[in-house]
Image (cartoon, rainbow, N blue to C red):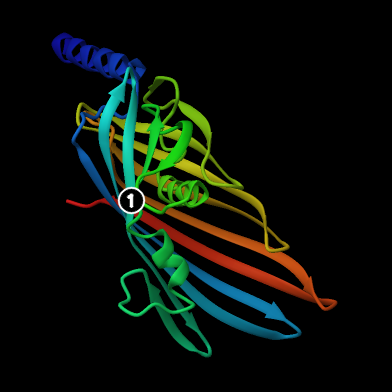
Amino acid sequence: MKKIILGLSLLISVFSVLSAQKHDIRLNLQPGLKVPVRYQQTTDQEISFQGQTMKNKIIQKNEVVFSVVSKNQDNFIIEAVINLIETTAETPQGNMKFSSADEKETAENKPLKKMAKKVVRAEITPYFQLVGEVTPVTEGLTKEEAIAVYEAFSSIFKGLYPTTSVAQGETWKADMTQGVKAESTLTSASPQSFIIDSKILLDMDMQGVKLSGKGSMNYEIHAPTGVPVYGLTTLPATGSSMANGVPVNIKLNMTSSFEFMQ
């Protein structure tokens, strides 16, 4: 019995030490490495006004790649490109699909084609924070267009990394995208992966509509390289506005995911 109690005590001590260990969750990449990531966001919309309800679904798909060109001390010089941008809309009037891969350019897919296949260069910290300015690599790409490409690309990774070392069970706060904040907790740590759970808070104005909501996110980071492996976010939100003096209520249910493309 004493041996069993002693063994359990040792196990508890080991687990306590592991849980208290601080982890620096960061990118650890070498020049030449390419990181391809697929992202998808599905938004179910329900718009109510004057006793009527209209339902829509918007699906956004992006495929991005960034590669490490060189290192600047702890920072990385990367080149990034959005290889595919695709939008699908399901409405009572019918379904529509626009893609940067469409052969024929239309008014609907022109903005997508303008951003796809354009290479930009930037310096980032190991926590995916931009240092300095974004520069265009693709010939003919303006500075403003390069910034827009980088912002669309980097929004997938923003806020995933704590800027200080954290122990298992420890929580930190981060800004994700505009109007979206996260309170994240390192729930599991091993030599191969970090599992993180986040509480998501939305508070923003979008085209005159005040939106608010609370959701959750779960994601995994590959511990040796710091590469994001997968992530899943669910975020319900509500909002209201006035249109020609008529109250309009909006309900959204947003589900987004990203995954490392093998």
- Asked if one can make out residue 44 in the rendered structure from this viewpoint, the answer is yes
Identify the residue shown where x is 26% and y is 27%: 28
Vertical placement of residue 165 versus 217, above or below: above
Graded by Cα atoms within 10 Å as few (under 14), some (14 to 19) or many (20 or more), the crowding at tag 1 reads many
Count the marks.
Answer: 1
Instruction: Report x, y in % for residue 142.
Output: 47, 50
Name the residue at the front extreme: 140
In the image, is residue 89 above or below residue 170? below
Determine whether 18 is above or below 262 in the image: above
**Quadrant assignment, res 239:** bottom right
- Whole-percent x and y of residue 172? 50, 29
Position of the N terminus, as image quadrant, is top left
Q: Nearer the viewer, residue 229 or 11?
A: 229
Coordinates of residue 248 in the picture (x, y in percent): 74, 74
- Farthest residue in the bottom direction? 93
Which is nearer the eye, 188 or 13?
188
Q: Amino acid at mark 1?
A: Val
In-image side of 179 versus 70 (left or right): right
Residue farthest right in this picture: 245
Residue toward you, 171 or 244: 244
Image quarter of residue 73: top left
Residue bearing the label numbered 1: 81
Q: Is residue 26 visible?
A: no
Q: Nearer the viewer, residue 231 or 65?
A: 65
Residue ID at (30%, 13%): 17
**Where is residue 92 drawn, in percent x and y?**
53, 88
Mark 1, secondary structure of its residue = strand
Instruction: Name the residue: 40% across, 54% down.
Output: 140
